[in-house]
Amino acid sequence: MATSSTAAPPASPGHPAGHAALVRDLQNALGAAAVLHLPEDLIAFEYDATIERALPEVVVFPATTEDVSAAVRIAEQHLRPVVPRGSGSGLSGGAVPLTGGVLVVLTKMNRILEIDRANRVAVLQPGVINLQLQEAVAPHGLLFAPDPSSQRVCSLGGNVANNSGGPHTLAHGSTVNHVLGLEVVLPGGRITRLGGRLVDAPGIDLRGLFVGSEGTLGIVTEITVRLVRAAPAVRTLVAVFDSVEAASEAVSAIIRRGIIPVALEMLDREIIRLVEPRIHAGYPLDAGAVLLIEVEGLAEGVDADGAAVEEACHLAGAREIRVAHTAAERDRLWEARKVGIGAIGAASPAFYLLDGVVPRTRLPAVMRGVMETSARYGFRVANIFHAGDGNLHPNLMFDPDEEGATARVLECAEEIMRLCVDAGGAVTGEHGIGLEKRSYMEWIYSPADLAAMHAVRVAFGGAERFNPCKVLPGGHGCASGHGAEAMAAIRRGSDSV
Amino acid sequence: MTATATDLDRLRHALPRDLERSSQHYVVDGVTPAIAFAPNDGSEVAALLHAADEAGLTVAPLGARTATGLGRPLARYDVALDLRGLERVIEYVPEDLVVTVQAGVTLATLQATLREHGQYLPTDPSPGDEVTVGGLLASARSGAWRGHLPAARDLILGMAVALPSGDVVHSGGRVVKNVTGFDMHRMHTGALGALGVVVEATFKLTPLPAVTRTLLLSAANIEACGDLARRVWDASLAVRAITVLGARAADGVMLPPVPAVLVEVAGSPASAERTLRELRSLAPSAGEAPVETWGRLRRLAAGPGATVLRLGIPPAEVETTVAALERSGMAAWAHLAAGVVIARGDIAASEVEALRALAVERGGFLQIEVASAALRKAVDPMGEQERLLVAALKQQFDPRGTLNPGRWGAGL
């Protein structure tokens, strides 16, 4: 990142009226070093983990809650949009400043403020990376349950904004189930607190409403999270199936036995062939699909649950079951899950990572539909996903330089999303609506439903200029049409994490 | 201001004739409403709300009426909206662990339906399972399982809410993981019906534990009970409740009148057996207690005739609060993992304020769960809230103040 110039910005024909005054006010409030405004400095902030690009007018790096509040107030005075951003690892274009304005980057607010072991609570700033928190609490025998696959880079503020999930959501729930309290800066700049330090707080669940609002209701400046005890025993096993369908049947069979594993992940043949040569975890290259299953609890319970899971898998047609006997073996099996998306990026010039969710019992039929649809369009598809939650992640691989490929991939993706909705599902399980899926909201919700969500934005005060063009369809000056928005979620292979 | 005959007729025209009930049956805090209705579905509820809104009448949604002592007394009460007619289980797919029900279904009915498939909705609110689903969500009161299991609000996958505008709006869906749009259903949990009337909810379910056992652990005094409870919590055992009982609370649930720790073991046979073994080694005196003890504790928290307080206190300090409350003459107990202390007895308004200050100082809260209208007028029952945001939401969803006016205080 280039350092910011302290000189007054030159008048530029590309800038909206009042640009110089905006920059000056922000510099006065936050300090010149915390404000970027030169075009060469802004380029790094025009996109997140997607290919949608839009240049912010100014980027600010607040160091304190008061800085955030000041930046929001100044943006408001200058009638500029405000877009919050954490690590920029979002997968739905939520941090793309589509209509310009002030991008508030929270990476400098990255301190863990408190770990209260006795009460299993941690207090931290929004720029703390998910994995950093995990590493800080692990010595206390505690963990923060949400563990998105991007946990090496994603920030907790981003997790709160997107209500992020991860492989262990199945038993532990998403981010919203682990956030106790928030300090937030509301549109207009007012600082307030929602929730507290305990699992429940009296009254309206405003903290729960705020989590997952994708930066449209305010900016999180401090997060109080709940920690859980690491389980005394864990068993990780891999069941190998000849087909995705058989593996999907096994998912239902396991749940039917009254066992909710802490993780129940599926990797299909395409993924196995991409990752196994890299990590040598022992996934069979000729498998149709594997389930990566984890049960935890007391040692005796883990033995019993593990045996029941094995039996369910065998009955569903598993041809082989492997159990990790050491922590190293367990880590290696999980490594495949963690490097999966990166392996797709390395193997294809571009790919579109989809995020849909269906009732578990509809998984076999919907997965068949995913395979048929992508085959019909002629795309390679790799599936690596949270099967236990019914949360699909088909990755459509394609070459954007091939004529018409991008348009066809968007069409194919839309058909797959339709399959999810028609099966009684939803269009995102954990990546968020962001920019990408705003138009799909109308597939699920009536105008009255959407009006109610809009009313919440109005009540919080940010309906017009706070992360505009996100979550809800419509909006002044926002691009529209599925193609334009869905494009946001396509990822270039070479850039993939 | 009172409702005129013309106003009431407008309501009668909005709904089928046979839905009107005798208003005498719906007295709340000594006030009889002008009229009462018992609709059967969400669209009828919405039609009634809309008609009342147009006529300038106020509506109090009612279910099993287990939480009418929660919140401020109503500022005005024209129309009783009895939701018990919304009594259908709309869809239950055991294989998906998902159920959709109308808001008037009682928790008892729901649990009985689910039990047939070895499943349950893992929540144990006071006063008991006679609460309706709508009441469960609007009052958002957790029980002994909280901290080990999710709150009711965390179990909601989707919701339908009737609004004074006449719309029935939906949020969420029927899948267990979903970030499609705002979690509007969270706004309605704990809202005491101030922002809309819940008419339908979809929940994610949990398999019933194969084995449950209730154990009573004793220790020398309340401080030792607190320590023992935390050792149980730290042992990561298969338990779904760890409750520290003051002597008066123990007496109130027909146990020996000494401080004790009540633990509910829940899990697979293998986990439960190991847990029982561990508990006996942590507390050699551990013995089985009647399973009914939990129901007695929930009823004790239901009040009638006494004041009941709920305090949020960090788990590390619950026993000192229990001890202080018991010294003041109340029966008190703590659900450790949730950091919740419940106290029942007589208490003056000034003492409630002092207790609240003490809880807030520790990062907690105080909520009046049950009390006379007089006490609920003298002391804010809910404590500090984000008033400005709540007022802004009220302005959006119920601008004329049709729903439960005053329950959140003046103007809300």
Image (spheres, coloured by chain):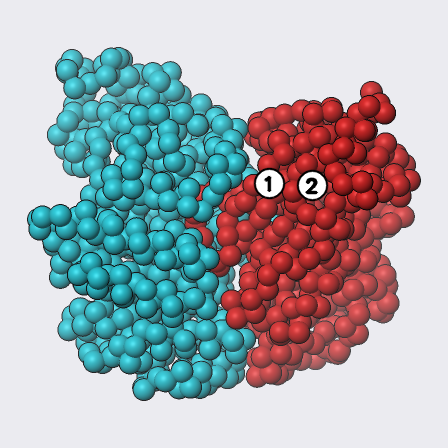
Answer above or below: position of A35 versus B157.
Answer: above
Quadrant for residue B170, please give it: top right
Residue B308 in the image: state x and y as whole percent: 80, 48
- Image quadrant holding the C terminus of chain A, namely bottom left
Tags 1 and 2 in contact by the CB under 8 Å rule? yes
Q: Is residue A226 visible?
A: no
In the rendered image of the structure, the colour used to display chain A is cyan
- Image quadrant holding the N terminus of chain A, namely top left
Marked residue chain, label 2: B
Say which amino acid is labelled 1. Val
| Nearer to us in this view, B4 or B276 | B4
Residue shown at 26%/13% (left/top)?
A18
Q: Which residue is mark 1?
A: B168
Residue shown at 86%/67% (left/top)?
B254
Q: Which chain's colour is red?
A: B
Q: Which residue is mark 2?
A: B45
Residue shown at 22%/27% (left/top)?
A36
Separation of marks 1 and 2 at Cα, in angstroms: 9 Å
Residue B167 in the image: state x and y as whole percent: 59, 36
Question: Is the residue marked by circle 1 packed among few (<14), some (14-19), or many (20+) residues within 10 Å?
Answer: many
Marked residue chain, label 1: B
Mark 2 lies on a secondary structure that is helix
Is residue A72 found left or right of B34 in the rendered image?
A: left
Is residue B111 found left or right of B327 in the rendered image?
A: left
Question: Is the residue marked by circle 2 packed among few (<14), some (14-19), or many (20+) residues within 10 Å?
Answer: many
| Nearer to us in this view, A268 or A446 | A446
Is residue B189 found left or right of A179 in the rendered image?
A: right
Say which amino acid is labelled 2. Val
Answer above or below: position of A430 versus B267.
Answer: above
